[in-house]
Amino acid sequence: MEGSDCDADAKMEEETSQNETEEPEKESSDDTVCQFFLAGTCRFGDRCRNTHIAASDASEQPTANKDNVSKDKSHSKRIGKKPPMKTASDVISRIQWDPHLPKEHFLIGYLDRFVGVIEKPFSEFCWEDLASAGIDVLAIPKHRIQYFKYQELVVWDKTNRTDNVFGSTGSGLTILDVIAQHETLVQTEQNDKEEMKQVALDLSDEEEDCENSTQDYHLQKQSTKKVRPTHFIAVRISSEEVRSTVKEVQDVLIKHNTEIAPFLTPLPELHLTLCLLHLVTSDEMEIVHTVLQEIRTEIQRILSPSFILSFDGLKDFHSRVLYLAPMFVPGLSSFVENLNQRFRSNGLVVIDPPTPSSFHLTIAKVPRSLASKNPSLRFLPEVYNNIQITHFGAQHIDTVSFCHARSSRCTDGFYTTLLELPLY
């Protein structure tokens, strides 16, 4: 048996050697084509003794390679798949336990079932199990969290798949990068503020040199005009009825003049401004928070819970700002005057609007320089008075917002909101 096995092994080895010697000749021959290869099922690959590609069969190559093409498509799909995003729970744990992250600088925007998205400081939340959390603490299901902010920068957003905490969605940024960039920005802004303070001191010295109160008054008014608002208190327009009406008006404006499109107010930005502020330091912003909290009880006394803001028609400022004028509401002007007085008494700079007695909901606004050069961009009564709308909708006011006047926006398109204060 052993001898026969050796003979069989030797014979097999000899045939294998002979096949390897003859293989180049068969590869160069077009006589024998592998039928299994044409069917796409050949399992020998390059070691196959028959010819895989013949000149006359070049057109059949895609069919023969269909398995490979299918594999390539599958591989492409795997490459195009979005990377998994770190969850809100991951971000919470990172903020809680990373000693390099100042918890007091983080904010959370979460979805309230009745009010909408509300923003609160991270330190106000209780992260215990909801079943064991007390009724006097702020505890929410983590799936309601919409975004996290570091200072005023959104670093994690569920809707837009933004993750600059871990960089899990491929942004290339982590929270430490964001903090470093923010510190650089703060330092730059601080330098600008120091320059502004110096200018203010120079103006103050000039006012002291004035000889009479009339000159002092005019100088004060002139310096106030140079100060631009950095923050504002507003009522956000969330009514779909009002928004749809504004959209209808804007469509008519565009139909009349397509050049007006860039100057239309986006629907998510619609708001009624109550107060304009120029704030420089974080202490001043904290004063705004305190005043709003203190005046909350007075709001409930002045304004009823059924406070409805209605609009009675379109008007314009100098033919370059088109707005909806709200109907007169008893108590609203008193509330705003009281609010401004509180801010001033606490040392804050309150900027008087161009028309103090007019609350307005801006629909479109053209810069003064462009309106003067291009008369076609002006809003004329003969155009907007022909819009056939008799009812412009109403807004239930139960919340006021403390917002930043910069160009940055929240994920829902509204201005960056530092505080949303429920009135009732």
Image (cartoon, rainbow, N blue to C red):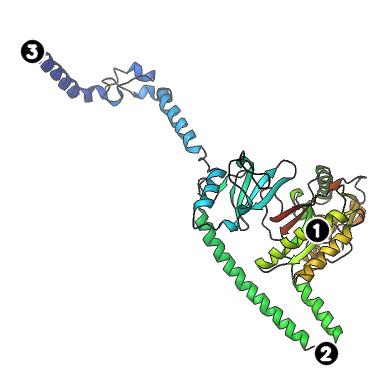
Residue beneath label 1, please? 273
- Residue 84 at least partly seen: yes
Residue 24 percent across, percent down from the top left: 22, 25
- Would residue 59 appear left or right of 3 to someone viewing this image? right
Give the residue type that dot 2 points to.
Glu
Crowding at dot 2, Cα within 10 Å, few <14 / some 14-19 / many 20+, comes out as few
Q: CA distance from mark 2 to mark 1?
A: 37 Å
Asked whether the residues under the numbered discs 3 and 2 touch, taking CB atoms below 8 Å apart as contact, a structural biologist would say: no
Residue beneath label 2, please? 211
In the image, 287 versus 153, the foreground residue is 287
Give the residue type that dot 3 points to.
Glu
Label whose residue precedes the other's in the sequence (2 or 1): 2
Residue drawn 69% across and 79% down? 199
Asked whether the residues under the numbered discs 3 and 1 touch, taking CB atoms below 8 Å apart as contact, a structural biologist would say: no
Residue 229 percent across, percent down from the top left: 74, 66
Residue 321 percent across, percent down from the top left: 83, 59
Residue beneath label 3, please? 2
User: At numbered mark 2, what does the secondary structure look like: helix, strand or loop?
Assistant: loop
Q: Nearer the viewer, mark 3 or mark 2?
A: 2
Give the residue type that dot 1 points to.
Thr
Residue drawn 77% across and 60% down? 294
Which quarter of the rendered picture does the N terminus lie within? top left
Residue drawn 80% across and 88% down? 210
Residue drawn 61% across and 52% down? 122
User: At numbered mark 3, what does the secondary structure look like: helix, strand or loop?
Assistant: helix
- Would residue 95 appear left or right of 289 to someone viewing this image? left
What is the quadrant of residue 291 in the picture?
bottom right
Looking at the image, is 274 positioned above or below residue 310? below
Crowding at dot 3, Cα within 10 Å, few <14 / some 14-19 / many 20+, comes out as few
Q: Nearer the viewer, mark 3 or mark 1?
A: 1
